Structures are given as structure tokens and as C-alpha cells.
Amino acid sequence: MTQEDTTNKIGKYFGWIAWIIAIGMLVFFFQELLDKQQNPNSSPTSYLSENGLNEVHLKRNKQGHYITSGKINQQSVIFLLDTGATDVSIPEHIADKLNLPRYNKYQVSTANGYTYVYRSVINELKIGDITLYNVEANINPSFKSDEILLGMSALKQLELHQSGNTLKLREQN
């Protein structure tokens, strides 16, 4: 093998490595872009209303949903706002990570039919600077999502105002 053949071979290897790195960087860049489209509220900003109450403005995502990052008992979670859900509904695998208590089992009607869930209570739920305490919730073993449905047991404690693609959540007096 000549020096020129070895140099060409090394050049081809570096060419392949450069392409792999370039593709990896593109995947990383576009994944971040897709994540922002899915959850445009990954760092919800809080404002003070004219009454001095905390307010969070959420943007609707490309699918028309309001998804936001928040916290349950100081642990980060992702919420999907759902005014059709009676309670905050937490997939079992997330409830296990959050060490949420389980109480009696009961049947509920969901968009996918009837299922059994466990009653629970969230000590502290946060979105931006808005904090709710002792929120009724359920733990749903058949719900496989990585998002928590933020139902009316939490939302009824807030004032909601939608305008265009923005939903304002505000603490109540």
C-alpha cells in the first residue's frame, strides 16, 4: 500500500466522521426546535397583575394545546391543561417517581372509556410563581403519557383568560 492510498483512506475516514458529527448536530438542533413546538412554555414566565396577583401567560402549541412545565412537591413535571378532566390526573409511572400517596380505588370515565384510578392529594403544585396547595388528584395506572393532565381540581382555583393563542392563568383573590 502506498503513502497516497493510506492518505486517501484516512481522508475518507475523516470525511465519514465529519458527516456523522454534522448529522448529529442537525438532529440535536431540530430536536430542540421540535421540543419547543411541543412545549412552548418550558420556562413559564410570571407577571404581577394590576391587583398584585401572580399571573402566568401560556402559549398554545402547534396542536392547539396548552402544555407547560411546572412542579409537584418541588419536582419538575409537564402539565397538559385539560378543562374536561375533573381532577389532576397523573400517570402511575410519574406518581411513583413523585412518591404520591394512594388512597381508595374508584372508577372514572375517560376519553378512552372507563378505568380505575387511585385517589391522591398533591401537597404543592407550581406553575411559574403560582402555587396551589392540597390539590385533589388521581393516579391512573392505564395512562402511559409523560404529561400530567391539569384538570379542574387545580384550574378551578385560578382565573383563566384566553385571547388568541395565549392563555392567562391568574391567582384568585
Image (spheres, rainbow, N blue to C red):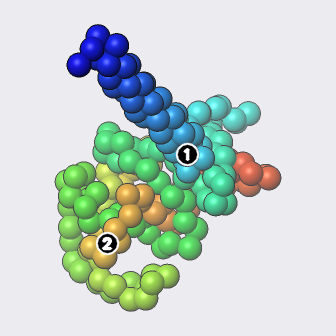
Foreground: 142 or 24? 24
Q: Amino acid at mark 1?
A: Leu
Foreground: 147 or 7? 7
The mark lying in front, picked from 2 and 1, is 1
Q: Earlier in the sequence, mark 2 or mark 1?
A: 1
In the rendered image, the residue lying farthest to the top is 3
Place residue 45 in its image quadrant.
top right
Q: Amino acid at mark 2?
A: Asn
Q: Residue at x 29, y 83 (%)?
A: 116
92 lies above or below 165: below
Place residue 87 in its image quadrant.
bottom left
Give the percent coordinates (x, y) of residue 62. 66, 55
Left/right placement of residue 59 relative to residue 1 reads: right
Residue to which mark 1 is pinned: 34
State the SS at label 1. helix
Q: Is residue 124 visible?
A: no
Give the percent coordinates (x, y) of residue 38. 55, 50
In the rendered image, the residue lying farthest to the right is 164
Locate the N terminus by quadrant.
Answer: top left
Q: Residue at x 26, y 66 (%)?
A: 92
Q: CA distance from mark 2 to mark 1?
A: 27 Å
State the SS at label 2. strand
Q: Is residue 150 visible?
A: yes
What numbered label is drawn on residue 140? 2
In the rendered image, the residue lying farthest to the front is 2
Give the percent coordinates (x, y) of residue 8. 37, 19
Give the percent coordinates (x, y) of residue 43. 52, 35
Left/right placement of residue 139 relative to residue 45 reads: left
Place residue 115 in its image quadrant.
bottom left
Q: Residue at x 38, y 48 (%)?
A: 77
